[in-house]
Amino acid sequence: MDIHDFIGSLNQLPPLTDSALPPLNSSDIDNPSLDFWANTDFALPALDSPPFLPPEKKKQSPSSRTPAEEDRRKRNTAASARFRVKKKQREAHLESAAKEMTDRIALLESRVKELELENKWLKDLLIQKDQK
């Protein structure tokens, strides 16, 4: 079936009418609730239903693996361990860099305050000299 046949088959469907929908009471309009939607054919599954889980893979026993599989598994384990070490080192480096930058910001902010006070003091001194 190509796309044109599919579209043609859609045109043969009866039109959607109000009779296809559940009846609507005036209380549903005044007090909308989830109960209304739970009684329809297109209600969503319950929130407490278990999520879809893929089937579990059967673990092979170490004796049933070929030497190539064992070697690949050991290399993968070692690579994973190296990655975890590198990740921890990178995180530690980033944390120390962030701390250094935070300390530098605090130092620069205190220096700005000192310079602002000095600037104000010098301006006041200049104003006093001009008044004399």
Image (spheres, helix red, strand yellow):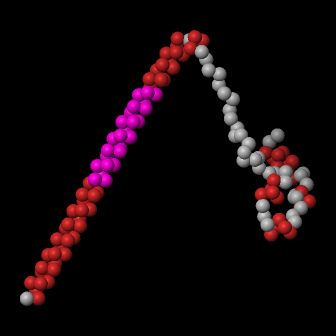
Q: For residue 51, which quarter of the picture? A: top right
The percent position of residue 16, horizontal first and vertical second, equals 87, 58
Q: Observer-nearest residue: 70 or 112? A: 112
Residue under the point 20% across and 66% down: 114
The percent position of residue 100, horizontal first and vertical second, equals 28, 49
Q: Observer-nearest residue: 132 or 73? A: 132
Residue under the point 84% across and 67% down: 27
Q: Is residue 99 left or right of residue 127?
A: right
Question: Is residue 17 in view from this perspective?
Answer: no
Q: For residue 22, which quarter of the picture? A: bottom right
Residue under the point 30% across and 52% down: 101
Q: Is residue 71 left or right of residue 44?
A: left
**Is 62 within the magenta?**
no
Q: The C terminus appears in which quarter of the rendering?
A: bottom left
Q: Is residue 22 left or right of residue 77?
A: right
Residue under the point 77% across and 49% down: 44
**Magenta span main SS:** helix
Q: Is residue 12 left or right of residue 99?
A: right
Location of residue 28 with respect to 73 vertically, above or below: below
Q: Observer-nearest residue: 87 or 114? A: 114
Q: How many marks?
A: 0
The percent position of residue 92, horizontal first and vertical second, equals 35, 40
Q: For residue 49, which quarter of the picture? A: top right
Question: Is residue 121 in view from this perspective?
Answer: yes
Q: The N terminus appears in which quarter of the rendering?
A: top right
Q: Which residues are magenta?
A: 80-103
The percent position of residue 35, horizontal first and vertical second, equals 81, 57
